[in-house]
Amino acid sequence: MGKVILEMKNITKTFPGVKALDNVNLKVEEGEIHALVGENGAGKSTLMNVLSGIYPYGTYEGDIVYNGEVCKFQKIKDSEEKGIVIIHQELALVPQMSIGENMFLGNERGKKNAINWNETYGEADKYLKMVGLSESSRVLIKDIGTGKQQLVEIAKALAKNAKLLILDEPTSSLNETDSRALLDLMLEFKKQGMTMIIITHKLNEVVYVADKITVVRDGSTVETMDCHESKIDEDRIIRGMVGREITNRFPKRENVNIGDINMEVDHWTVHHPLYTERKVVDDVSLNVKKGEVVGIYGLMGAGRTELAMSIFGKSYGSGITGTLKINGKEVDLKTPREAIEAKIAYVTEDRKGNGLVLSNPIRVNTSLANMKGVSNKGVIDVDKEYAVAAEYKEKLNTKAPTVEQNVGNLSGGNQQKVLLAKWMFTDPEILILDEPTRGIDVGAKYEIYCIINDLVRSGKSVIMISSELPEVLGMSDRIYIMNEGRFVGELNAYEATQESIMANIIQSGRGE
Amino acid sequence: MSINVKAVLKKYTMVFALIAVLIFFHAITGGKMLLPQNVNNLISQNAYVFVLAAGMLLCILTGGNIDLACGSVICFIGGIGAIMMDKDISAVFAVLVMIIGGLLVGAWQGFWIAYVKVPPFIATLAGMYAFRGLSNVVLQGYTVGIRNTGFLNVFGGGADCYIPDFFGNGALNITCLLTGVVLAAIYIVLALKNRISAKSKGYEVEPVYSMLIKMVIISAVVIWFFYKLANYKGIPTSLIWIGLVLLAYAYITSNTTMGRYLYAVGGNEKATTLSGIDSRKVYFFAYVNMGLMSGLGGILTIARATQAQPTFGQGYEMDAIAACFIGGASAYGGEGSVFGIVIGALLMGVINMGMSIMGVDANYQKVVKGIVVLVAIIFDVLSNKKKK
């Protein structure tokens, strides 16, 4: 047993009308990686915000004991001085500035009114080496990938002399390789004696790095598991998170007849919109049948979203070549409107950025892609709109008081349901779902899978893009594997395994 | 039953601010503020603000975009009309030319903004210079008077620009008062009908008492307003144009698909585009429409002044923008209402008039106006912060 470095005792935090945290206790030992897991809205981030002083002392009840003393943080700077540094889910870097400038933003090296650039870049390079980045710290943030940006965030934390590092969903925007590299880096830090708290939805990562796992449910800590005492697997964690046994994470699909080919894409090539000589999608051919779920698995940056958006009315890319057939007939869809009329729906991976109007209510978002369905000659029939939104809210079990609730106030899972409702209301035959369960909790995921099953049962075709292997394996009838803009394999669900998919990707990389 | 005072205060802050300002000036000017003639002037002097703000609202909804050119366009369009009528061309034809001219100007600016993606600020800044110059060219630097009384009467200028009283010749204009009563009655009937239909479909309706309070207040204000006008010369014709424009825009913004697209583009343009809506058309619509309102604004402005001058319309664009922001339109787009801009325009008008009656120096009036705009926006920013 190591020394307890941090103890949060009986933390209670109330917001007007809601008790976000109720008597939470958390004990973290020096030099361990402590994972905090729980469904969305369980209170993990609130707890970390209390710890880092975002919610100042006095706005919560209970004590934070760090290194044996009671801490009364008033602001983030206070906690950072003690070496508690939090890295938030959203990257907080200025794209137009260099790595070095970002790293010491607000913490500049040199004299008060004269920044010492040599010292800045020199020190920055030192910290970059520690996180395994070979880039010069003079490179601009926008010129490096998300995976490296995440590492810069960590280097930035190290530059603040972090003793206790809190990582909030550090891998949510990273691909599998970068995620693994980041986790290995965490294990490396652990060896050097750093203490870390990681919040994540990806349970395989928890199993990989964590020494202890604390489960937060409905604002309280439910249990803490010690990974060294007994073997903890993903099912064990899920049981703790949802408070019940989920025997099957993927609902069974029964009574589905797979019919004729609904959509066929042949020799589809897409170029980058700016660097027009670069191929983003390279000679891809695919088809999807009625009543079928086709999975497209690929790492982030493989060109999956670009493929989907280019099919959806050429909403991405330039110099698109290839043929697109719907029901055997060749079509040329030039705008999203034409794609919608051809009965295609594209449910974006970025629901906040590309999917929903957050400042508008559920009702308005539900009808946005099919205003014709709720209007007559340009005049909206608000009654009808209300009825439609209420019907989908009921059908998809969206949790909100009324359909007049702004979608910005909903949780990720419920936002995803509103987004699905919007596209279901356009009455599509082919749905392209891009990362339909990203960032939503286990319960909501299950509900989304059920909706997908209902869709194919009624004869629709679903193309599901995902970078989560278990999801692709659990939901698809057929799987395409995409890597670096090309399809490198096609597998039937019964013959596909995690290993066979990864093998496909690795082989394709060697082939070059 | 309990009324949530805080929520009401928050929702109608600017309405309460308007009332407070009215009471303040009423007291400090010894009751002059609310004399019938001043109430009348409040409308006719500010007709252009209401009209321009309605057009500006649509632009602002698409993402905080503004039109800096509309003041110059008013002068340009007004100048063309004045010259035409000066040459004894029929007023109907002149009005038609001015309206079409406004639409063309709007289409010109809208094209660059929507289809070439010139930032609206810059595209309309260019328009502000160019159309100011063109007004001077059209008017050749002179003031051109308007003698066509038919035109003046219809568009709110000259001495007889009022709806005539059809009943008797008393001191009180009965037609005007009756109009007020009828409007209040129509409002009550519509509100009741709406409530009954909403209830029959099982929608949420506001509690009876709050509806009753609202009804009484609105009817009382409407009747009081027309009573004041009746004590002067009756309904100014400019009020009819304002009323038509505001009703049309309230309808467009709340009940049409185009209105919905304006809010959606301002709220999240990418999501709107991916929903199959051509955002370029939405921008184009907003600016063509702004041109139309500039055209109408030009007509009202030269009618009110009974002449056209090359300096007309300077700063009008800022008055319109200020009315929108005071009325709660978001500087980032996606939020705002016609009701809001009415309150915003009235608030600015009342402050201007009150200070004029008090004899405050014109330069200080500008300072006060500036402070009012700033305070309104600060309030908006702070209250949004609390929401989060």
Image: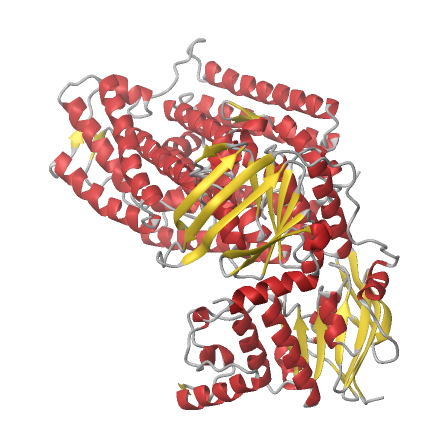
**Viewer-closest of B385 and A319:** A319
Q: Which color scheme does this rendered protein use?
A: secondary structure
- State the residue at coordinates (61%, 80%): A77
Q: For this view, does B136 lie left or right of residue A47?
A: left
Residue B371 visible, this orientation: yes
**Viewer-closest of A511 and A61:** A511
Q: In which image quadrant can residue B43 be found?
A: top left
Looking at the picture, how far across and down is residue A76, in whole percent?
A: 63, 76
**Viewer-closest of B19 and B77:** B77
**Viewer-closest of A114 and A191:** A191
Seen in the picture, residue A469 relative to B315 is either above or below; the reply is below
Q: For this view, does B225 lie left or right of residue A167?
A: left
Q: For this view, does B388 lie left or right of residue B111?
A: right
Looking at the picture, how far across and down is residue B237, in whole percent?
A: 37, 22
Residue B22 visible, this orientation: no
Number of numbered discs present? 0
Looking at the picture, how far across and down is residue A188, in whole percent?
A: 66, 85
Q: Quadrant of the N terminus of chain A?
A: bottom right
- State the residue at coordinates (55%, 26%): A375
Q: In which image quadrant can residue A110 be found?
A: bottom left
- State the residue at coordinates (17%, 39%): B134
Q: In which image quadrant can residue A43 be found?
A: bottom right
Which residue sits furthest left?
B140
Looking at the picture, how far across and down is residue A330, in whole percent?
A: 46, 34
